Image: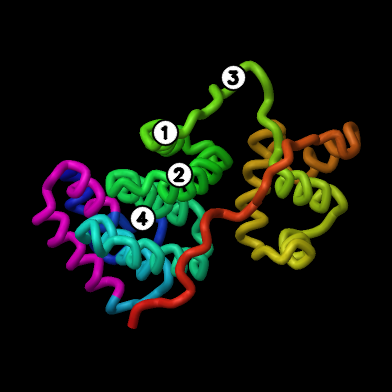
Amino acid sequence: MVALETRTRWPDPDEFVPADLVEAYVRSGRRSEAAKALKSLEHFAEAAPRPWLLALADRCRGLLAPDAEFVPYFSDALIRHEEAENLFEQARTHLCFGERLRRAGQRKNARDHLRAALTVFEQLGAAPWERRTRSELRASGETLPRRDASGAEQLTPQELQIALQVAEGKTNREVGAALFLSPKTIEFHLSGVYRKLGVRSRAELVRRVGETGSNLTAPISKSEAVGPSPATTLRH
């Protein structure tokens, strides 16, 4: 906790810790200190109202809000995350939202957000976050299959599409235009493709596809969306 407390000056998005500090305080039951840390975060968000900062501020408000008031904050945070295109932080918000929904007795809604978080954490290889999310899903009543450590992970349908198009020589921007996704989203999914296939570059991916054709099979998924759609109207 001390390390987090000493790193609250103006940083870049990858080093910004006030939101982590708020969550750490909340999880340890130190709500008054969490509220003070939130004030610091809100100061940053007011000084530079960038989508990623506004999203973090709303997520932290959702963590501290009473049971009858937290849903709109998390919904607003998810909208901001879509603007900022930071899938890891978006997944963290889905996780926090799911945790609060489960504790409020809304298990079905909680599972929707927890599944969305788990999908991203698995693709990123974020093992500690994946374990936390799986624990929450089980607590919500979800039965999860055990991970098969002996076999290679399969590509999702969207990852397969991206892999095949990249193998054709398309850039991330060109693939994104074809699939109606942003280049950052393509980059995110492509990192999952590399990890699952054990390749380290586009050249290796092209070679792999050349050897196997379209046999980079993937399971059928009902939806490739990042998660449940957030509310369409922001508070004013």
Left of 44 or right of it: where is 226? right
Left of 158 or right of it: where is 232? left
Residue placed under numbered mark 2 in the picture: 111
> What is the spatial separation of the Cα atoms under label 2 and label 3, in whole angstroms?
24 Å
Residue 12 appears in the rendering: no
Residue placed under numbered mark 4 in the picture: 15
Query: Residue at the location (30% across, 65% down)?
Result: 57
Residue 171 appears in the rendering: yes
User: CB atoms at circles 2 and 1 under 8 Å apart?
Assistant: yes
- Disc 3 crowd rating (10 Å Cα; few below 14, some 14-19, many 20+) is few
Image quarter in which the C terminus is found:
bottom left
Splitting the image into 4 quarters, where does residue 196 fall? Answer: top right
| Region of the chain picked out in magenta, as a range | 20-45
Q: Position of residue 141 (x, y in %)?
A: 42, 33
Residue type at numbered disc 1? Gly
Q: Nearer the viewer, mark 2 or mark 3?
A: 2
Q: Nearer the viewer, mark 1 or mark 4?
A: 1
Whether 77 is drawn above or below 128: the answer is below
Most extreme residue toward the top is 150
Q: What type of secondary structure mainly makes up the magenta span?
A: helix
Query: Residue at the location (46% across, 56% down)?
Result: 90
Left of 113 or right of it: where is 123? right
Splitting the image into 4 quarters, where does residue 13 fall? Answer: bottom left
Residue placed under numbered mark 3 in the picture: 149
Q: Nearer the viewer, mark 3 or mark 4?
A: 3
> What is the spatial separation of the Cα atoms under label 2 and label 1, in whole angstroms?
9 Å
- Disc 4 crowd rating (10 Å Cα; few below 14, some 14-19, many 20+) is few
Decide which of tag 1 and tag 3 comes sooner along the chain.
Answer: 1
Residue placed under numbered mark 1 in the picture: 141
